[in-house]
Image (cartoon, rainbow, N blue to C red):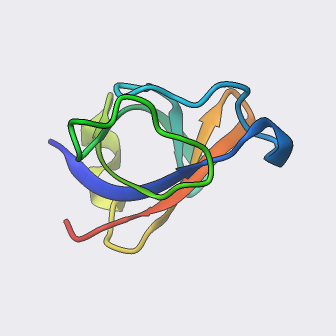
Amino acid sequence: MKYEAVVRFLSKNEGGRTMPPMAGYKPHMKIGEEQTSCLITPKDSAVEVMKFGKDYEVFIEFQYEELFSAKIKSGLNIGLYEGSKLIGHGYMLNL
């Protein structure tokens, strides 16, 4: 199942990534105290690279959806990670 969210990626100067992520990026997403792998795809199919500091409406698909679907709620704040490093943040939209 695809969930909708708004995300913003952090630049290296903000403590995030060196290179902006491409469409189809697979970070870890923190929900509460737990993390899971996910696939992030921009809603606008013309977007190939998600630039730093810009909000993007995206689709998020979870690797283990059955473990997290009950925790996903509209307005839920999310963190996007590479290992323990915060590389982006956002919130869930209407489900």
**Drawn side of residue 46 relative to residue 57, left or right:** left
Most foreground residue, 59 or 73: 59
Q: Is residue 59 above or below residue 63?
A: below
Give the farthest residue toward the front.
Answer: 46
On the image, the x and y values in percent for residue 84 come to: 74, 33
Which residue is painted at 70% across and 31% down in the image? 17
**Drawn side of residue 63 relative to residue 36, left or right:** left
Task: Tally the numbered discs.
Answer: 0
Most foreground residue, 68 or 44: 44
Q: Where the N terminus falls, by quadrant?
A: top left
Which residue is painted at 32% across and 72% down in the image? 74
**Drawn side of residue 92 relative to residue 8, left or right:** left
On the image, the x and y values in percent for residue 85 come to: 75, 35
Quadrant of res 24: top left
Q: Where the C terminus falls, by quadrant?
A: bottom left
Which residue is painted at 40% across and 74% down in the image? 75
On the image, the x and y values in percent for residue 83 come to: 69, 27
Give the farthest residue toward the bottom.
Answer: 75
Most foreground residue, 73 or 70: 73
Which residue is painted at 34% across and 58% down in the image? 5
Q: Is residue 25 above or below residue 13?
A: above
